[in-house]
Amino acid sequence: MSDRKQSMTTTNNNIVSRRVFRRFSIGQNWEHAILLISGSILLLTGLPQKYRTASWSQQLLSTPERLETIQQIHHIASIVLILLVIYHLGRAFYLMTQRRLSAAIFPSVQDLRDAWQMIKYLLFLTDKKPKFGKFNFEQKFTYWFIFIIVGIMILTGIIIWLPELITRFLPGSVIPAAKLAHSTEAIVAAIFIVIWHFYHVHLERFNASIFTGYLNEEDMKKYHTIEYQQLTGEQVEETETGGSQ
């Protein structure tokens, strides 16, 4: 559950008190930062290897030494990503055993209702936007989409990295299939994050809560109305709600 705290700002010698709400823990902030950094390095070092016939790739990988360096950086970043996933799953399992794992991120029937309500709103069939709790249906979709993509990337990456070991147990055809899946999923993930996630979270309405851990009261009221009411016990007027982030 999110925490509340007071922040003090000074304007024209007047002190204004504002409430902010904790959205993510420090550990979750670091998880996101490591995912962002390792994912970016994997993409930047993976693209030249995928498009080896392109002129820019041939210039970048013009010598065996350069290729080896790029591959080593790619492998190091992949190890960091694997360790991050192990930590993420381990923490979730620990919280589950302690009965402290929040169900807020898991999909539910309400998400389908909210999505349908949002579609009707966008088509001008209703003037009411759905109200959301800690996470809306778009955020849940983003989390689980990336979760599945990262799982596929790790699995296929291991197959490509250790072909001799893998082909002791699986047919050789699994290697080219893994290469195709690995590179294709990387492109899909990059397009999804840049066009969908980055735009909706950081451009359409700048939301820095995944970096700071906190969200201001105005955005909590507007974009996470149900959670705001649960935390404060205060009702929110219809004119103060809206949005999908």
Image (cartoon, rainbow, N blue to C red):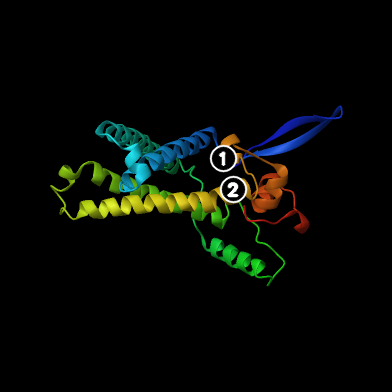
Which residue was labeled with disc 1?
210
Q: Amino acid at mark 1?
A: Ile
Residue 20, horizontal then vertical, whole percent: 69, 38
* Residue under the point 26% across and 43% down: 158
- Horizontal side of 235 relative to 166 (left or right) equals right
Residue 6, horizontal then vertical, whole percent: 72, 33
* Residue under the point 58% across and 50% down: 199
- Horizontal side of 8 relative to 183 (left or right) equals right
Residue 13 higher or lower than 92, as above or below: above
Residue 41 higher or lower than 244, as above or below: above
Q: Are marks 2 and 1 in contact (CB under 8 Å)?
A: yes
Which residue was labeled with disc 2?
201
**Furthest residue toward top:** 13
Residue 228, horizontal then vertical, whole percent: 68, 48
* Residue under the point 57% across and 36% down: 211
Q: Secondary structure at mark 2?
A: helix
Label 2 environment density (alpha carbons within 10 Å; few <14, some 14–19, many ≥20): some
Position of the N terminus, as image quadrant, is top right
